[in-house]
Amino acid sequence: MSNNGIPRILKFLRALHGGITQERLAEQLKVSTSLIAKFETGRLVPMPDTARRLDEFFSSGDLVQGLAADARTATAAPEWFRPWPEVEREATALRWYESTVIPGLLQTEAYARMILRSGLLTEPQAEQYVSVRLDRQAAVFDDRDDPPVCQFAIDEGALRRGDPATLRDQLNRMVEIGQRPRTFIHVIPVSAGLYVGLSGPFMLATLGDGRVVGYVDDQLQGRLVTETDKVVALDRTWQAVSAVALPCDLSRDLIMKIASEL
């Protein structure tokens, strides 16, 4: 992690603020001195809340937060996934279909943790992946003056899986996000029966130059899709999925109904 830029920046910021010591900085942030030392040697990357408090203390805007987000994505995310967050940050439009879980960009922290801890990841790995997921959400929804148009198509079954309390908060969060400009959430109801999307989740991103790229997952890993014929195939699948999805208002009503039943 020593190439993440944070060690050099923290040392510079301490020098800029009168040479404040690691001990004094730790005291101000109410963390251990050893934690600050690990940041400055590149052994650890600040979590979002700690990065925010560092920026607040040094009046450095979002400098540390940005470096920490980039470093967490680069070190925590699997190598095969790392190109996709960059695509998300540059996209003018995003389309995401999921058949079994809530799309990552819509997940609450608690839901993301529940999903990631349900598999084969260790607890530290799961926590790193949660952090990456939250950073991706911020990069798409909060950190851009001109956020992308986002369309989500989600199978109704995905809305019913998980711990009831966690799932209720997650569904209410989706209702809130669905009210934002440029964000459209569609549910494919059980009544749609069998449809082509059940073959697996995928994403499509439109970039500023008009190019469209895709991303698909399988049991082993995900992969970026750039070949024209394969992108066209994913686009056709999206059109077929959209054809059986409910409009946004009816989708919202169904999400709220399921949440009220939990």
Image (cartoon, rainbow, N blue to C red):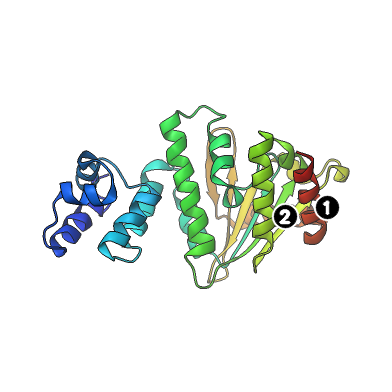
* Quarter of the view holding residue 16: bottom left
Residue 170 in view: yes
Q: Secondary structure at mark 1?
A: loop
Q: Residue at x 12, y 62 (%)?
A: 18
Q: Indicate which label's residue lies in the foreground, 2 or 1.
A: 1
* Image quadrant where residue 14 sits: bottom left
Q: Position of residue 104 (x, y in %)?
A: 58, 47
Q: Position of residue 140 (x, y in %)?
A: 52, 61
Residue nearest the viewer, comparing 8 with 30: 30
Do residues under tags 2 and 1 come within 8 Å of each other at their CB atoms?
A: no
Residue under numbered circle 2? 238
Residue 137 numbered mark, or none? none
Closer to us: 202 or 63: 63
Residue furthest to the left in view is: 19
Horizontally, residue 112 falls left or right of residue 100, namely left
Task: Please say whether residue 245 is visible from this viewpoint.
Answer: no
Q: Quadrant of the N terminus?
A: top left
User: Among all residues in the image, which is located at the extreme right?
Assistant: 191
Mark 1 lies on residue: 244
Tell which of 100 and 159 is nearer to you.
159
Identified by mark 1, the residue type is Val
Q: Residue at x 45, y 38 (%)?
A: 127
Q: Amino acid at mark 2?
A: Trp
Image position of 54 with respect to 116: above or below = below
